[in-house]
Amino acid sequence: MYIAIILLGIIGAVAALILFFLSKKFEVKEDPRIAQVLEALPGANCGGCGYPGCGGFAVACVKAETLEGLSCPVGGADTMKSVAVIMGQDAGETIPQVAVVRCNGTCEVRPRTNTYDGAQSCAIASSLYSGDTGCSFGCLGLGDCVDACAFDAIHINLTTGLAEVTEEKCVACGACVKACPKNIIEMRKKGPKSRRIFVSCINKDKGGVARKACKSACIGCGKCEKECAFEAITITNNLAYIDDTKCRLCRKCVAVCPTEAIHELNFPPRKTAVENTNN
């Protein structure tokens, strides 16, 4: 009995030694910069960078030959500068972005045609039917984007029935964009002084049909496109779109839109005709 115990002990010790030497021989050493980069990241693990959490992003930064194209939306430019110092590289320019909701179909301009009494989920409702209004493109207002946001930056306005973004809290992680089954949420340049202009509509129906479903819908008339001197506006499938890389924020397109589908955010109030005359 004692001999068997001794033999088992010897076998166990030998096996342990073999495993020890094998682990040393085939040991994969982690680049210490991964831990340093991870320490510099905000730890949100939101996936907005396109990688599975901050750990995945840290590994990607260390393995990449350049940091171009790599960005932490939560940490922004300051975080990427810290990462660049660790990597001994140039962080490049990070353009701040923010989520915008491209639907202006409030309860007043987009009347309900039926009542949805199913699961309170945009994804489920979208898979079952086109919506409770005449517009099959608009916001369903059931809050999948709210549930997806880890930063409390988006909520449903109970009066309008639309999702609204709190700019100060938005970190541009893109979680709300992925959560919206209607694809009405878009990441756009934050713009100088947080000023932005965008078409708050994604309705691709012809003008008459779109206007009947929602008084604030883009009708694809092309007035904004003709007014823009910077070729920032295009009309595709009856819908206008403003390219934020070309837009110069002149606001001329806003003034000519007959349905007020083009939104301007954070601009000073326009001068009235009387004010212009006095000046």
Image (cartoon, rainbow, N blue to C red):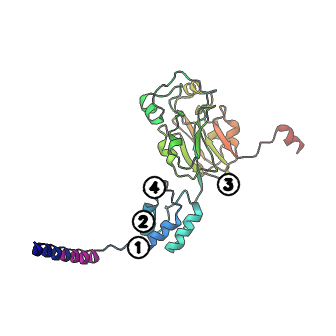
Q: Point out residue 202 in the picture as x, y percentages from the top left corner.
A: 54, 36
The kind of residue tagged 4 is: Gly
User: Does 230 sit above or below residue 217?
Assistant: below
Observer able to see residue 242: no
Q: Name which of mark 2 and mark 3 comes first in the sequence.
A: 2
Q: Distance between the residues labelled 2 and 3?
A: 33 Å
Query: Which residue in the structure is indicated by mark 4?
Result: 50
Relative horizontal placement of residue 124, taking residue 77 as reference (left or right): left
Q: Point out residue 112 in the picture as x, y percentages from the top left corner.
A: 56, 23
Residue sitting at x 48%, y 32%: 120
Q: Residues within 10 Å of mark 3 (few under 14, many from 20)?
A: few
Q: Name which of mark 1 and mark 3 comes first in the sequence.
A: 1
Query: Which residue in the structure is indicated by mark 2?
Result: 59
Q: Name which of mark 1 and mark 2 comes first in the sequence.
A: 1
Badge 4 element: loop
Query: Which residue in the structure is indicated by mark 3?
Result: 192
Badge 2 element: helix
